Amino acid sequence: MDTSFKNLHVAILSSPGMGHLIPALVLANRLAAQHSVNVTVLLVTTAVSPPESKLLQIPLHRDLVRVVELPPVDISHLVVPTTQVVAQLCVMVREALPLIRSAIAAMDRRPDAVIADLFCTETAAIAAELGMAKYLYVPSTAWFTALTVYCQVLDREIEGQYVDQPEPLKIPGCKPVRPEDVVEPMLDRNELQHDEYVNLGKRYSLFDGILLNTWEDLEHETLQAFRENETLRSIIEIPVYPIGPLRRPVEPVDVKSDLLGWLDRQPNESVIFVSFGSGGVLSAEQITELAWGLELSQQRFVWVVRPPTKGSVDDAFFNLGTDFDGTPNYLPEGFIKRTQNKGLLIPMWGPQAQILSHQAIGGFMSHCGWNSTLESITSDVPIIAWPLYAEQRLNATFLAEEVGVALRPRVLPTKEVVRREEIESLVRRLMEHKEGQEMRDKVKKMKISAMEGLKNGGPSYKSMCELLSKIAVRKGNMNGLVG
């Protein structure tokens, strides 16, 4: 199978948000570095935050990848303060459709294919109009994708709120979803974002295929359902391409940095890293309990600390970090002094990929965003699952119950405050007990499986080649018609 596709040009469309932009840039680099594809990343930007690509430290493939930030869209007249994140993202992309079309049409070299992220489903019509192949990129699990696709059926067949159902929600060929684990847009069927989410799933079938940031060994049963389950295939007939795990590269940290110097002085696998992603914020009460839990555990820690939220997680998604001076005065009195020999605090942002890859890190307290999950798995680090929003509850359940590399609090952190005693117990179990070591051993085996998949000739590598071959064949056929 040919693995070089230097004659192809692909446009990747990314909706706003670090959790969407990072996978788009990583995919672009993979296509360029491994398959010689020319890639243009079109980034939908917002009027309320700075261009997010400036916040990322992902070196792009010098010759083959370029990023085009579209002019910011203003949706202030289309949303209200209570409009939730998924609805806002859908509205942003909808308003940006003319900009996306103009940007593609104006390119000197028209892309042979568009790869749209999961919130850019309405661009399928643009790709069809301009005669391009069109693929969807879901930088998450096959299980989440199955739920998204099948939600249109659940919407027809189930009455009342999903969270009130007495039984798990059944998806053909897949693990059922417990009502409390449904994704954020399914929590309240009366919200606009629920309807937007259902419609997103309906539009998946407009594409020529779906790229998934997972791999065969991790989700064989669910991937098999996409290929063979007749009921699921009656909803979505297009092929799926597991191409993962794609993650940010680990770039060298300044050798003089306090962070790296501190980690270098710690024993191997002795530090727990605490971070809740680009949009993760906690209440003041939960921050206090977390601080006490870390202190009581007597374990070494690195904690990316942020001010407590004054509203909802949705409020923080587009505005995180715009008005913070870096002083963690919201922590318990005396906490910093008492833990100065055990812990290191990083205000607002930390080089997560570099931290997780350090030999001193032995655990990760994480929101279970899929980018962070893949970085953790491919760094041999097990997880304390702390889901906050989006599909993170689903991911947490998958990691704890199916894969066996995560511990969970007894209650969802978004429903109740997790108390210091439980936090202390979770941290000790992961860092000191046999249970944690068994998870560490398991995640190391998972990493081997993941890396084998990405190797030349591995399942994920072959899956990407199959996808690119289809684009190349289509391009050849189109050229023949034009000629």
Image: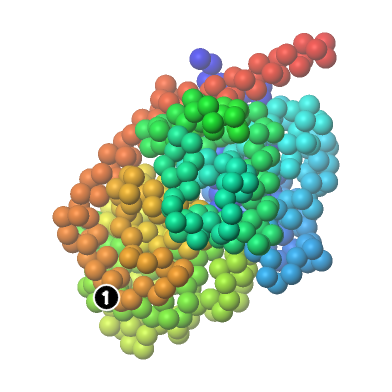
**Of residues 197 and 355, which is closer to you in this image?**
197
**Of residues 455 and 212, which is closer to you in this image?**
212
Q: How far from the left and from the top, in percent, is residue 114?
A: 69, 34
Q: Which residue is mark 1?
A: 421
Task: Look at the image and tell me whether residue 394 can be seen.
Answer: yes
Q: Is residue 228 above or below residue 259?
A: above
From this viewpoint, which residue is outermost toward the left? 434
Residue type for callout 1 = Glu
Q: What's the residue at 36%, 88% (across, down)?
A: 333
The quadrant of the picture occupied by the C terminus is top right
Q: Toward which corner of the image does residue 137 lie, by quadrant?
A: top right
Q: Is residue 295 above or below residue 65?
A: below
* Disc 1 crowd, CA 10 A, few/some/many (<14, 14-19, 20+): some
Q: Is residue 132 above or below residue 195?
A: above
Q: What's the residue at 77%, 50% (across, down)?
A: 94
Q: How far from the left and from the top, in percent, is residue 303?
A: 38, 68
Q: How far from the left and from the top, in percent, is residue 93?
A: 73, 51
Q: How far from the left and from the top, in percent, is residue 359?
A: 28, 53
**Of residues 416 and 277, which is closer to you in this image?**
416
**Of residues 455 and 359, which is closer to you in this image?**
455
Q: What's the residue at 34%, 45% (across, down)?
A: 402
Q: What's the residue at 60%, 42% (across, down)?
A: 153
> Number of labelled discs?
1
Question: Does residue 139 appear to the left or right of 421 in the view shown?
Answer: right
From this viewpoint, which residue is outermost toward the bottom? 333
Task: Look at the image and tell me whether residue 259 can be seen.
Answer: no
Question: Does residue 343 appear to the left or right of 221 in the view shown?
Answer: left
Where disc 1 sits, the SS reads helix
